[in-house]
């Protein structure tokens, strides 16, 4: 499987395309065991655009109406962490939740893109965890503070090019499956999201669109291990403290 990302191996920073189909990582003709590689966040976006309530089952579990158009919000790039990094629980919150998501990575600068041409601007896809301080979200009545703490945007482990239309997405908490769905259940698919978001703002190369989470969101506690697995991409694993 051809993938794009950033990693440290043998003490050196490596960035670019590599092959992980054999269970190891082949970069520039050099083979690295996956357990000998430290994956960094695969891209450094100028912004992260997130979509709320984009799975029918998640909207229903929150007792919210199905939106007529995408509900979007932003996360700062300072919230980003990579595979096997630590999610830090902030002292301001007593309820921090996981939200497993498919993330779209933009491949080149675009504005006012139609849904028909949207895939031309996609670099690939990766796993994303929209970590949320749920109590602060409810208290504030808007989402900025609850979504923006440092470490609240785990992403990775790398970017893969594939069709996003019917991928199994699963979240596991301490080995137990807590979210399970497919991207066919998205209310607004990837082309519609790119069309909508790019009509509002310019998307730059390596910007990230997090496409929303399915039902089953729940609380994180110190000591937890949370994994987001998406078919054809891989597993994003993070630890909580």
Image: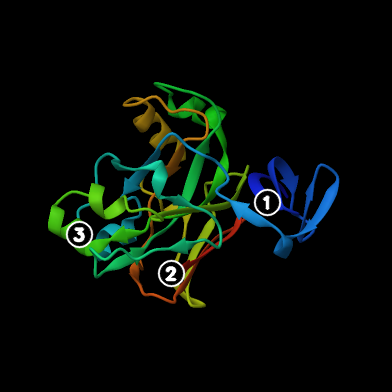
Residue pointed to by mark 2: 240
Q: Residues within 10 Å of mark 3 (few under 14, many from 20)?
A: many
Q: Report, in whole angstroms, how far the alpha carbon at label 1 lies from the one at label 2.
A: 22 Å
The residue sitting at 36% across, 42% down in the picture is: 76
Residue that appears at 44% across and 29% down = 115
* Cβ atoms at labels 3 and 2 below 8 Å apart: no
Above or below — where is 80 with respect to 136?
A: above
Residue 39: image tag: none
Q: Are marks 1 and 2 in contact (CB under 8 Å)?
A: no
Report which residue position mark 3 lands on.
Answer: 136
> Which residue appears at 58% of the width and 44% of the height?
163
Q: Quadrant of residue 59?
A: bottom left
User: Which picture quadrant has residue 122?
Assistant: top right
The answer to whether residue 171 is above or below residue 81 is below
Question: Residue 159, how many percent across, how many down?
Answer: 60, 45
- Give percent across and percent down for residue 145: 24, 51
Q: Which residue is nearer to you in this view: 176 or 131? A: 131
Q: Nearer the viewer, residue 100 or 119?
A: 100
Q: Give the mark, 1 or 2, whose residue is nearer the N terminus.
A: 1
Q: Position of residue 107 (x, y in %)?
A: 56, 31
Mark 3 lies on a secondary structure that is helix
Please report whichever mark, 3 or 2, sits nearer to the chain's N-terminal start: 3
Q: Which residue is mark 1?
A: 8
Label 3 – label 2 distance at C-alpha: 19 Å
Up the image or down, 144 lies above or below 202; here it is below
User: Dot 1: what SS?
Assistant: strand
Examine the rendering and report whether any part of residue 87 can be seen.
Answer: yes
Callout in the foreground (1, 2): 1
Disc 2, SS: strand
In this rendering, position of residue 235 left or right of residue 74: right
Of marks 3 and 1, the one in the foreground: 1
């Amino acid at each position: 499987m051809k993938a794009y990302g950033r990693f440290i191996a043998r003490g050196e920073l490596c960035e670019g395309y590599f092959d992980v189909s054999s269970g190891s990582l082949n970069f520039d003709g050099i083979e690295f065991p996956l357990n000998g590689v430290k994956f960094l966040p695969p891209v450094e976006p100028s912004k992260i655009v997130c979509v709320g309530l984009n799975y029918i089952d998640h909207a229903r579990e929150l007792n919210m109406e199905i939106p007529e158009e995408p509900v979007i919000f932003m996360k700062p790039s300072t919230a980003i962490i990579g595979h096997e990094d630590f999610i830090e629980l902030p002292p301001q919150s007593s309820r921090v939740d996981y939200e497993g998501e498919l993330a779209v990575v933009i491949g080149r600068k675009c504005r006012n893109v139609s849904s028909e041409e949207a895939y031309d601007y996609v670099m690939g896809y990766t796993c994303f965890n929209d970590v949320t301080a749920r109590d602060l979200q409810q208290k504030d009545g808007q989402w900025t503070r609850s979504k923006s703490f440092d470490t609240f945007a785990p992403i990775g482990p790398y970017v893969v090019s594939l069709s996003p239309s019917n991928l199994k997405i699963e979240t596991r908490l301490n080995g137990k499956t807590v979210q399970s769905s497919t991207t066919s259940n998205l209310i607004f698919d990837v082309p519609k999201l790119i069309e909508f978001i790019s009509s509002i703002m310019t998307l730059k190369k390596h910007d990230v669109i997090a496409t929303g989470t399915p039902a089953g969101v729940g609380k994180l506690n110190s000591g937890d291990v949370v994994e987001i697995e998406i078919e054809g991409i891989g597993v994003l694993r993070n630890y909580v403290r």
